[in-house]
Amino acid sequence: MFINISFAPLEAAFREFVRNYGFIFDAIKIFLLQGFLVPLENTLRAAPPWLILLIVGLIAYHATRRWLPTAAFVLCLYLVGCFGLWDKLMSTTALMLVSTLLCILIGIPIGILISRSNWLRAITLPILDVMQTMPSFVYLIPMIFLWGIGQVSAIFAIVVYALPPLIRLTDLGIRQVDRETVEAATSFGTTPLQLLLNVQLPLARPSIMAGINQTVMMALAMVVLATLIGARGLGETVNQGIANLEIATGLQGGVAIVLLAIVIDRITQAYGMDGRQRRQLLGKGGGFPNPFRRAAPAEKV
Amino acid sequence: MNKVEVKRVYKVFGAREKEALKLAQGGMGKDEVLRRTGCTLGLQDVTLSIPAGQVFVIMGLSGSGKSTLVRHFNGLIQASAGEILIDGQDVTKLDARGLQELRRHKVSMVFQSFGLMPHKTTLENAAFALTTRGEKREAALEAGRAWLERVGLKGYEQKYPDELSGGMRQRVGLARALAANTDVLLMDEAFSALDPLIRSDMQDQLLQLQRDLHKTIIFITHDLDEALRIGGQIAILYHGQLVQVGTPHQILTQPANDYVRRFVEKRAANLEVAEANKPSAQGPAGSP
């Protein structure tokens, strides 16, 4: 009763495509590896851990404007070091930063585009649905054809998985900007670009930052899976635990990922507030003496 | 010469715009057009001349098309048919760039719900029109500061809109529109969201500013008292059609039809009641 449908011809076509146009993907691979991932990973791994902890502390303070969370975040990462996983933590961080950067570079422009056109949005949303529901293992396979086993395949697998929420939330954020505000700005003769940069993007900021936050979280969730196609880092520890049936090793790797996730989640969430809200927080929750309050807004990290 | 000329403007909302427009231009009524095509007639055959340098009030109840009409003057809404001339230039024929220029240099607008940028300070909001048209930031902020002072908001430059009261926010909206230094100022129910006392303050302030500035102000309102108080001329819209244009005195004494008469009678009745109540109210108040 069923006619036979097979995706085999598709696979043949894909292989043919890779044979003919593989050089494009090689170029992308070299660009990403040499230009971003390798230098970043090497720098992070070579840097003394106290310096990294200090930088994380400064960023956390800049984002949250409070001492207590800042100290807690630094402690989280310090703990990962105590597990003996500092080196792997740095590899995972580098992988995640590059994937997130790619997601932002791809996701926000697409989000902006589909916020301005209903038909483009109608085409894009189902694709995003597929990206989110397709089991990740399925698109690990073609990644290997394109880039071989290694970090770059891992990065793109992560991008496919982590991109949709950023696109959705960018689109939503821009569409949710108050129509009256947009109308008022238009009535003073803004160009479309002025409207986007001065009104829509700043007002969509909380939504876009929530999207970046989601993207980072999903990237971290993919870290373990990405090890299967050659990503280095904390995922390796988890897989090692599975392979050797070592509960402690697996748990340490898992907890390390969770700790990293907490730190990044809180910091990116805090950046969802604008500078003004963070300055106000400083006055309320920071618990500083007054002189500090005046000095803080000028501070740059 | 008149500053703004509106000539036989129609506006149809809905998918079957062309068809509905043809029916409307053939003289079919709003309800019949809606029944036949599912399209709403926003404006029907509106023709209007607005002279320079005075406050021209367009009045009507909600749904009368007054907010739709005012948005035609700066191209926020495109007319389905007809011409709108500002200084002899037809707004309906302008392309995107032309509209931008019109909005930057000729027509500015004040909104009922203020339309301030919540992420910008009062000062940046006041200077918005100037920074948008590319003037130097310093000069723009300086002009913004001067206008804020003029509307009575000196000292609030660094506040954000959500830190201001409704009346103050609308002053910022007014300062922003005035800073643009355009000849034509559109005010869409600008004072309707304010409470009565603040509202009459703002009306006074507007009249005072107008004495110095002599702009062409097109003021939309649903409030007859407001219209009579500030309008040099009043146009009354009803279901997208122009019913009457005249001075406040003409509107009060020679209402063109029953609709206008009912509008005006209410006020006349209120006046009579108020006058009838006055002596009796003063009696007890004066005795102790």
Image: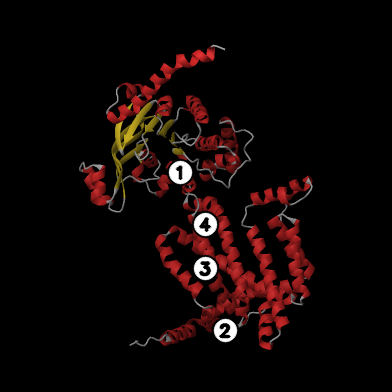
Crowd rating for badge 1 (residues with CA inside 10 Å; few <14, some 14–19, many 20+): many
Q: Earlier in the sequence, mark 1 or mark 2?
A: 2
Q: Disc 4 to disc 1, how far (Cα)?
A: 22 Å
What kind of residue is marked 4? Gly
2 vs 3, front mark: 3
Residue at 54% over, 73% down: A161
Residue bearing mark 4: A173
Q: Earlier in the sequence, mark 2 or mark 4?
A: 2
Pick the residue in front: A157 or B33: B33
Residue bearing mark 1: A187
Question: What is the number of the mark on residue A148?
Answer: 2
Residue at 70% over, 78% down: A251
**Chain identifier of the residue bearing label 2 in the image:** A
Measuring from the top left, give residue A107's x and y in whole percent: 53, 65
B97 lies above or below B219 = below
Residue A299 falls left or right of residue B152? right
Q: Earlier in the sequence, mark 2 or mark 3?
A: 2
The local secondary structure at tag 1 comes to helix
What kind of residue is marked 2? Gly
What kind of residue is marked 1? Ser
Q: Mark 1 and mark 3, same subunit?
A: yes
CB under 8 Å between callouts 1 and 2? no
The local secondary structure at tag 3 comes to helix
Residue at 51% over, 14% down: B284
Q: Disc 2 to disc 3, how far (Cα)?
A: 24 Å
Residue at 64% over, 75% down: A34
Residue bearing mark 3: A164
A176 lies above or below A123 = above
**Chain identifier of the residue bearing label 3 in the image:** A
Q: Mark 3 and mark 4, same subunit?
A: yes
The local secondary structure at tag 2 comes to loop
